[in-house]
Amino acid sequence: MAGGIGSRFWPMSTKKFPKQFHDILGTGRTMIQQTFDRINQLIPTENIYVITNQEYVELTQQQLPDVPASNIVGEPAMKNTSACNIYMAKKIENVNPNAKIIVMPADHLILKEKTFLEKVELAFDLVSKNDYLITLGITPTRPDTGYGYIQFIQEKNENFSKVKTFTEKPDLEIAKSFLESGDFLWNAGIFIWSAKSILSAFKKYLPEMSNQFNGCEYNTESEDDYIDLIYPTVSKISIDNGILEKANNVYVIPSNLGWSDLGTWTSVYTNADKNDENNAISSKNVLTYNSKGNVIRIKNQNKAAVIDGLKNYIIVDTEKALLICPRENDQLIKDYVLDLKNLKKGERFM
């Protein structure tokens, strides 16, 4: 899934060039390329599909030239994750009715790739034998209010567990109680199921959406016209709300993956290499004085920058915009972007 805008990563991430197409951590590979590299170790290139916004199809093809062009699909509108999941499940089922599917966001960091691949293989084995909808759950390390939580039923001597409840982004006190209870995991948004199981779940829990996608002749010349026709009427609902919170066959595999959704500049700071002053700097010509705990990104590598007296700040300079704000305010960046749009000439900044 590669259709998001990543507005919390403004000004590096913009509507025309969003987060998943950037090398956020300075590894030499963009987030979508790293995601491809990771899953390509298990799944052949011809079986990897990307669903993104129509606006980003060409950009995706440029960054993933090995993926067949027919496997890179552009949604005509952003409709959250239920629509893209049923669309791709239908498209894949048309090729192989017995397919097993892993669904992955294109912009997540996974440091323990070997462990990740082992968990995915376990999940594939489970869904090939059972009518299960599986999610990977991350052991929480802090009471984070930016993640969804999965409550699971503890099983003895099992490496997977039945899901009891889903909770979307709780407040701090509830997040603390989740952490203390020991039976909650972060929802990584990585799902594994068979085409049959997920399409059966859509038929049961989102029947209207299921019917809307039934009339298409997938992988033919008429597919695009049909999808363009129905998408304006498709409900905008997440796969979590639409399916997983309702289904009784959802299981979770606890996974210690070195995972982060890299959802904020603070999460980038946490996972980036830092110098002796704990500044995360990915630009060449930056001098810092009396400055600690900052994340600093200067797009123009020939541009010099001097930072004096700033502590725990985000400093991001691009061709069109400059952001300087405390790291603790990184959740407000979406609001900054909205306010800029409301400026009379705000569009030229975006």
Image (cartoon, grey):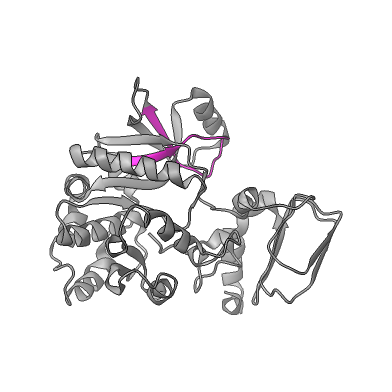
Asked if residue 245 is positioned above or below residue 10 in the image, the reply reads: above
Give coordinates of residue 290: x percent, y percent.
86, 54
What quarter of the picture does the C terminus occupy? bottom right
Image coordinates of residue 299 in percent, x first then y, are 66, 71
Residue 127 higher or lower than 226, as above or below: above
Q: Nearer the viewer, residue 149 or 205?
A: 149
The answer to whether residue 229 is magenta is: no
- The answer to whether residue 139 is magenta is yes
**Residue at x 29%, y 58% (from the top left corner):** 83
Where 212 sits versus 270, above or below?
below
Compared across the picture, whether 104 is left or right of 291 comes to left
Residue extending farthest top:
156
Query: Residue drawn at (56%, 39%), measured in percent from left and top?
Result: 144
Quadrant into which the N terminus falls: bottom left
- At x 19%, y 72%, the residue is 223
**348 left or right of 170 in image:** right
**Rendered position, 166 above or below 177:** below
Quadrant position of residue 66: bottom left
Q: Is residue 349 visible?
A: yes
Magenta extent: 134-152
Residue 313 in picture, x, y percent from top left: 73, 55
